[in-house]
Amino acid sequence: MIVARNIRSFRGEVDLVALDGQTLVFVEVKAWSVYSFESLSYGMNLQKQRRIIETAKYFLSVHREYNSMAVRFDVIFINPAATDDSKKIIHLRAAFTETL
């Protein structure tokens, strides 16, 4: 279930916040034409991860009702040019971690 979209803070933004059971999931959505760990590290470098984490902390400070939940950071790659349907959307669960 999607809880929020396009969350912005002074440090960054998060595309989606969703509930997956008892886990609050912060999701970054990227349009990307190449799927590999190299592209993940390029598209989700440490600086981008930190911005998402800081925005997640901001979200949790405003929405305290979620503070007791586990947190996960996912990345969804979308390749609209892919001819193979299985490669149009790649969902990387727990793409990176942080203790909040």
Image: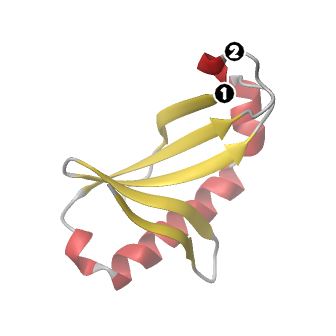
Q: Is residue 100 left or right of residue 66?
A: right
Q: Amino acid at mark 2?
A: Asp
30, above or below 62, in the image: above
Identify the residue under disc 2.
84
Identify the residue under disc 1.
88
Q: Amino acid at mark 1?
A: Lys
Q: From the top left corner, tell me how far across and down residue 76 is, in percent.
A: 58, 40
At a point 56% along the width and 42% down the height, the residue shown is: 75
Q: Is residue 51 left or right of residue 43?
A: left
Which part of the image, by quadrant, shows the N terminus? bottom left
Q: From the top left corner, tell me how far across and down residue 67 is, in percent.
A: 24, 70
Depth check: give the residue in front, 93 or 45. Answer: 93
**Label 1 crowd (10 A; few <14 / some 14-19 / many >=20):** some
- Tell me the CA gap for discs 1 and 2: 7 Å
Callout 2: SS: loop
Residue 50 in which image quadrant: bottom right
54, above or below 23, in the image: below
Q: From the top left corner, tell me how far across and down residue 54 is, in percent.
A: 53, 70
Residue 89 in which image quadrant: top right
Q: From the top left corner, tell me how far across and down residue 82 is, in percent.
A: 76, 23
Callout 1: SS: loop
77, above or below 60, in the image: above
Which part of the image, by quadrant, shows the C terminus? bottom left
Residue 83 in which image quadrant: top right
At a point 62% along the width and 65% down the height, the residue shown is: 51
Q: Are dots 1 and 2 in contact, CB under 8 Å?
A: yes
For the question of whether residue 44 can be seen, the reply is no
Depth check: give the residue in front, 53 or 99. Answer: 53
